[in-house]
Image: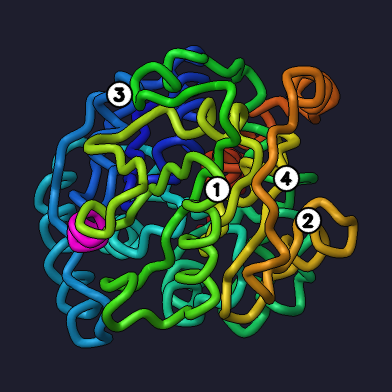
Amino acid sequence: MRVWVDLTNSPHVLVLRPVIERLRARGADVEVTARDFAQTVGLCERLGIDATVIGRHRGAHVAAKALGLADRSTALLRWARGRRFDLALGHGSNDVTVAARLLRIPCSTMFDYEFATVQHTINCRLAQAVVVPDAIPPERLDRYGARGKLRPYPGLKEEYYLADFEPDPAVLDELGIDPSVPLAVVRTPPVVSLYHRFENDVFAAVLDRLRAQGQVVVLPRVDAQRAELAAAGGFIVPERAVDAPSLIAHADVVVSAGGTMNREAVALGTPVWTTFEGRLGAVDERLIAEGRLRRLERPEDVELVRRGDGAEAAALASRTRRDPELLVDLLCTPLRADANRAAGNAAAPERG
């Protein structure tokens, strides 16, 4: 079996790492492509994933996204043609779904936020399997063409890819962090400017508040944010991809405008606040209802204080670990469907 995995954003490297490993353990020949965006390539290098880098992010505007989809899908098609893949996989990657359809390769897609309309319309209509958390009501995905294709899984995707994870304190030394001083880990929103044209005033105020209370590691999305944070001073801004799960496990609080880092904190038992200003997805709705994720509305809601080693150890000991083999099985369902169709065709009587 030959499998193609495409990685288009930093979190996808973490999500699909155990899938790649387990596919190979099953005897599959797995090839990986990656888009040059955020820390995707750096994380592949850090985790030992040999990936062919194809394409880059074209920007946030609709026209730029459309151009990027066309260009990268075409480049992927050229790369994949003749490689005789049996299955293509991606986490929200439109590019691989389009290329796989044009090459008639069965394809599975994953995601855990249901309101990315354009992305899901492409992926759900073109893919043969749509792997999502069971927290998402199926009717929310019907309009994308996902009916009959859904392969739900329990819990958070982070509980699967962090199942074998144990935090490494080396990340603290790597970043020059004093373990006796309160530590906040912050993930920036997907906007270019943090202060000059900042779209989230609450987030900017939280940055300043946390800086006054302890150590703050900020993980920017793009180089422009990194440069601006360095100019502001008082923040620890990594120059390269770091062991973010270990950093989160050792943190006293996490504040993130994104989704994956919030849910990693939930999975690892670290107190976490979301500053996401878009429409909440079903996964976050459930986590907030359960009290595992808090929505930040005022900067003064966050207090940066040391949790203590005992609290940290207890949180890690009580976390939920889920078997990634389930995700592999769900992602491979198009192969079983093809096998069943082939068996049915072979058993069908010839027509005279």
Tell me the crowding category of disc 4: few under 14, some 14 to 19, or many 20 or more residues within 10 angstroms, Cα based. many
Q: Which residue occupies the foreground of this view, 148 or 292?
A: 292
In primary-sequence order, the first of circles 3 and 2 is 3
Residue at 28% across, 52% down: 233
SS of the residue at dot 2?
loop
Q: Which residue is mark 1?
A: 261
Q: Residue furthest front?
A: 212
Total numbered circles: 4
Q: Image quarter for residue 166? A: top right
Q: Which residue is mark 4?
A: 271
In primary-sequence order, the first of circles 3 and 1 is 3
The amino acid type, in three-letter code, at marker 4 is Pro
> Looking at the magenta stretch, what is its main secondary structure?
helix
Q: Which residue is mark 3?
A: 46
The amino acid type, in three-letter code, at marker 3 is Arg
Question: What is the C-alpha distance between the residues marked 4 and 1?
Answer: 12 Å
Work out which quarter of the rendered image holds the N terminus and state it.
top left
Tell me the crowding category of disc 3: few under 14, some 14 to 19, or many 20 or more residues within 10 angstroms, Cα based. few
Is the residue 352 above or below the residue 25 in the image?
below
Residue stretch rendered in magenta on the structure: 222-228
Disc nearest the viewer among 2 and 4: 4
Question: What is the C-alpha distance between the residues marked 2 and 1?
Answer: 20 Å
Q: Where residue 187 sits in the image (x, y, percent)?
A: 46, 54
SS of the residue at dot 4?
loop
Is the residue 153 above or below the residue 56 in the image?
above
Question: What is the C-alpha distance between the residues marked 2 and 4?
Answer: 24 Å
Disc nearest the viewer among 3 and 4: 4
Is 105 magenta? The answer is no
Is the residue 25 above or below the residue 32 in the image?
above
In primary-sequence order, the first of circles 2 and 1 is 2
Q: Which residue is mark 2?
A: 134
SS of the residue at dot 3?
helix
